[in-house]
Amino acid sequence: MEKIIPIIIAAAVSLVVGIVIGVIVRRVVAEGKIGSAEKEAARIIEKGKSDAEAIQLAADNVRKEADARKKEALVEAKEEIFQLKNEADREIKERRKEISAAERRITQKEETLDKKNEALERKNETLDRKIKENELEKEKIAELIVAQNKKLEEVAGYSAEQAKAELISRIEAEIKDELAQKMIDLEAQFKDEADKKARNIISLAIQRCAADHVSEATISVVPLPNEEMKGRIIGREGRNIQKIETLTGVELIIDDTPEAITLSGFDPVRREIARLSLEKLISDGRIHPARIEEMVEKSRKEVEASVKQAGEKAVLEVGVHGINPELVRLLGRMRYRTSYGQNALQHSVEVAFLSGIIADELGVDSTLARRAGLLHDIGKAFPHDVEGSHVQIGVEAARKYKESKEVIHAIEAHHNDVDPQTVIAIIVQAADAISAARPGARREDLENYIKRLRKLEEIATEFAGVDKAYAIQAGREIRVMVKPEEVTDQGMALIAHDIAQKIQSEVKYPGQIKINLIRESRAVDYAK
């Protein structure tokens, strides 16, 4: 125990000494740090003072530069203001010059007007004086006229009233002559204007209704797969071909033409039925009388359906409504009718369009015109065994199915069977002529064509004074050479009119024919 106590005392003394030494060391270290911090602070203060002096110097430089720029801007502004002032002064001087010139012109005009006013006043005074003088002269003339009238009455033995009546009658006669001449001139002028207007309307109608034309013939050709099929169609002892011809009413022509049969007939509906029947029989391969009857009946129903569809399509295309269904069916039958090779239904549709266009140009009811144009050839839809012309048949059909009087009259008058009494009838007549007269719209067979040309030349050469006649342009023009020693220039117009009248009465033709007379005078002499 006694040994432990000194050890404890020594440890405590050592601890106290260590603490004291630590405190002293920390104080020394702290004093060293404080000294370095004071030095760093002194250094920072010195640096701040130097930076502040630099900033102050830079600020002084910026202020000096701003003052210099301000002075330059003031100088430039002063120069610009000076220039603007000079320009304003110059413009003011120019405006003053213009105003001075305008004032001088106004002054000159005022002086001129003053001079004119003075001249007008002098003229007015002169006119007033002359008017008074004229009034005096008129009074003197009136007195002289009265005296002369008395002397004329005494010399002529006529009173003033009788002389006046004679003078009026003479003036009336002169006025009538002048009026007649004026009427002739106006008629010629109106005719020229009407012709020009008509040409414009017709050309517009043709341009807007430029339809294609397809000429059709009276025969149809049915192709065969092989030559053996001809014998099967003829049948044993010709019973098959006889059956087909009996049921369809069409003649079958079987000749040396390879792999083809020709159907001939004037009724296009029957010919179409026969063609369809033959095509069905050839496709089926079974050809005997019972099968022929079945196919012909089936083809007839197909054609009837096609006829109805064609009529409805035409009515819808033209844009007319309320047509009797039977008339629509007749229109469809016209699809299988032709006139000089022109399809009758296409012709009727085209006439309807042309009639509507012309009616619009003339300010007439275009719907009624299209209806009349579509039905104008409805008589052609009836079979050939119906008696009467297609005009008469068409009029009866239109009356039967309750068409209007205007449409019936247009049908009746489109070939001049009666004189046209309405504008619609004249429009339909013109549209029918335009459609039929187009090049390529219609055609004739060669024999009829040659006969018509010869007939035209014969008619022209029958007249006295005609030397030669030539039909040209497919018969649409006749050039007639007259003998100059027998026919005068004035007589040519009469001969041309007579030829035209005779052609109209004796020849049937589509469109119109131009008669062109040529008279040549020759003078011959010989140098000896």
Image (tube, rainbow, N blue to C red):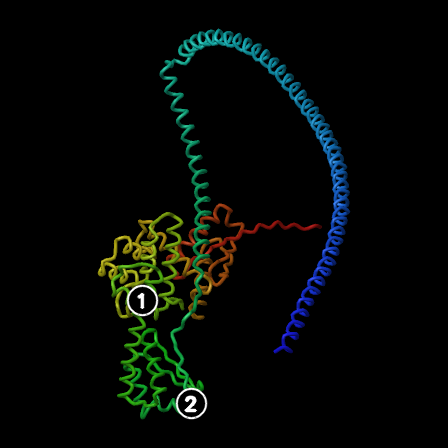
In the orientation shown, which residue stands out farthest toward the front? 2
Percent position of residue 207, x then y: 46, 57
Residue 154 in the image: above or below residue 227: above
At 45% from the left and 70% from the top, the residue drawn is: 446
Distance of label 2 from label 1 (alpha carbons): 37 Å
Q: Of residues 295 and 247, which is closer to you in this image?
A: 295
Q: Which mark sits nearer the N-terminus, 2 or 1?
A: 2
Local crowd at mark 2 within 10 Å, few (<14), some, or many (≥20)? few
Q: Is residue 49 left or right of residue 250?
A: right
Residue 319 in the image: above or below residue 71: below
Percent position of residue 444, x then y: 42, 68
Percent position of residue 258, x then y: 45, 86
Q: Of residues 385 and 318, which is closer to you in this image?
A: 318
Specify the quadrant that holds the N terminus.
bottom right
Q: Residue 280: name its quadrant.
A: bottom left
Q: Which SS class for mark 1?
A: helix
Percent position of residue 36, x then y: 75, 56
Q: Of residues 253 and 283, which is closer to you in this image?
A: 283
Q: Is residue 458 visible?
A: no
- Residue located beneath label 1 in the image: 311
At 75% from the left and 47% from the top, the residue drawn is: 51
User: Which amino acid type is shown beneath numbered disc 1?
Assistant: Gly
Residue 343 in the image: above or below residue 175: below
Q: Which SS class for mark 2?
A: loop
The label nearer to you, 2 versus 1, is: 1
At 34% from the left and 71% from the top, the residue drawn is: 336
User: Which amino acid type is shown beneath numbered disc 2?
Assistant: Asn
- Residue located beneath label 2 in the image: 226
How many callouts does the rendering have? 2
